[in-house]
Image: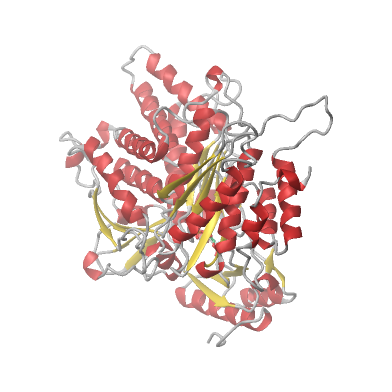
Amino acid sequence: SSSQELPPGLIAELMAVPPPNGKKLAYGTAGFRDKATLLDSTFQRMGVLAALRSIACGGQVIGLMVTASHNAVEDNGIKMIDPAGSMLAIEWEGHAATLANARTEEELKAILIALLAIAAPSFPSPSTPTPPRPRPRVWIARDTRPHSHRLSNLAVEGALLVVGGKGGVGASGGEPGEVVDVGLMTTPQLHHCVRMENCRLGDVRTGKERSGGDACPVIGGGPGWQGEEGYVRLLASSYLALCSTAHPTAHSTAGPTAHPSLPSSDLWLDCAHGIGALKFPALAAAVNKGAGASAARLTVTLVNTAEEENTLYLNDKCGAEYVQKGQQPPKGMDGRDKGRRWASFDGDADRLVYHFYDQEGKWHLLDGDKMAVLAADFLMDALKESGLPPPETGDEGGQAGDWKVAVVQTAYANGASTRYLRDKGIPVVFAKTGVKYVHHEAEKYDIGIYFEANGHGTVIFGETMAKAILSHREKLEKEVVSESEGSEKEKIATTRLVCALQLINQAVGDAMSDLLFVEAVLRLKGWDIADWHKGLYTDLPSKQLKLQVQDRTVMSCNKDETRAMTPGGLQEALDVLMASPAVAPHGRVFVRPSGTEDVVRVYAEAATPEIAAQLALDASKIVYDMAGGVGVRPA
Ligand code: G16
């Protein structure tokens, strides 16, 4: 390849927007994230990279999401979405960082030519003509931060430098590619749109057109599920279908709505002043249109809402991060809310936590662990009751237990939740913090349930499992209607699995989809939030702190982040804390560098809140002393 292949003017355009001085940019836990004022060059270059990634993926749509999610309003960020709606492939994270940090013309040329060669290899021999380059497609969405629109435009411009008109590398004689500014969306909505569009056109892994009947209609994208409207249609209809599986016998003869323990339809939703406030109403309206006066109805009061494009108070004293990390109610909620069911989204609506004041006026949090356990219980029951034949053999009489189900947690998972799951015989595995790591681990199972304690999570079904569930339902539907209670039970359980598969976002953790799933399960169980809180396990008291350090890269951890590897001696000092008689045997503490903010995070849990708080404080002092703490030493 030669530099001739780069679109004319590309290098000059990029050189005109140089990266910030003295800053090494890294593709972190959720893409690039920093003060919005430092990110112009990064956004432009991510546009370029997305177009190249699309070429590398055979012209499938690549997404770019402009958001800094839970971070304060001064920050912004950008992350890339791969064709299957998943996070960017790890090997391209390195390319992203190299491109973002390239300073000189030579560095830029080198990385771009290398990327072009990866994306669209050319064959020098005259006997093997170079195939025409695929037409790149990039879709860009943004959250409501005040600087998101401007930065998103820079990404659009960057993508156009590659895609656009004459000379664009996507052109290669044919049509130019496409760059679509899809406007305001939640992060999971964009993941959904990218996934469904690519599924519609072909196999999301190979990019090749699908051969006839081998596509799984759910995993591979159902009819009419494309775009934001398709998202609303899919979620609302599968939520309603799930609610309609209530066992009639479980309720009084007057019907489900008359059951005394049925949870109220009322929900208060703290939107963190983010995009969720703009997007949730359409979903609730679609649900209520179909729900009529049934128990599936949602009556939602939005709190901490947003104005388009101008959310100055984003995540400020509200939202999932504030509520979960600080273990405190958001603004707008107070003691008068006794017994009311509350939920909090984060700034881009990919995290969800629930919380409430009990009748005594004590506030309680139901975090991602509580959702993981609720989902695991519900799905394991449905799987057992469904009569689904085991994998491969398809023989009658096999055990549904042959399907591999697991819950993936991170070091932040409350120890009580892990113990509860293991006691129930549900395997638990651990992964590094960050949805991209837990998702990857969950993909190894037929049903992989993952929720980070911070409320970011989902349940993913493997393709073999999904196909088996769908064909099992088809088989049950065809069966001569038998009056036996057993077969009715199997049908209900199988329908529940199908609905879960459709309702729960298969691409990524999604607050709106998770909320509908939790609401449906609570209704099916006849549980209010207090029942859910008491009905599973009691959290061990915990405490989280964060502290500023000069350079968070001096800190590193082992694979699952339960132990610090550097700086030397730090873990040994934490071990001494954990061995003290007041803390052992149930207390534990770990520290890790954040992947989204310039801080080190500290997590402690112990038998009492006081011990947990002391443990977290003592650990912070150690981090401050050994890892270059900034400002006042914690006291
Ligand atoms: C992002 C990731 C989450 C992860 C979190 C960790 O959250 O998407 O999966 O748990 O970062 O943040 P840190 O490394 O700072 O502790 P979000 O909601 O900001 O996208």
Residue 423 horizontal/vertical position (percent): 52, 49
Query: From this viewpoint, is residue 87 visible?
Result: no
| Residue sitting at x 33%, y 38% | 239
* Left or right side of 617 for 628: right
Residue 67 horizontal/vertical position (percent): 48, 58
| Residue sitting at x 53%, y 52% | 157
* Left or right side of 226 for 213: right
> Across the whole image, how many numbered discs are drawn on residues?
0
Q: Quadrant of residue 484?
A: top left
Residue 68 versus residue 489 in the image, above or below: below
Is residue 463 or residue 609 the one in the foreground?
463
Residue 123 versus residue 13 in the image, above or below: above
Query: From this viewpoint, is residue 344 visible?
Result: yes
Is residue 547 or residue 83 the one in the foreground?
83
Q: How is the image coloured?
A: secondary structure
Is residue 56 or residue 255 the one in the foreground?
56
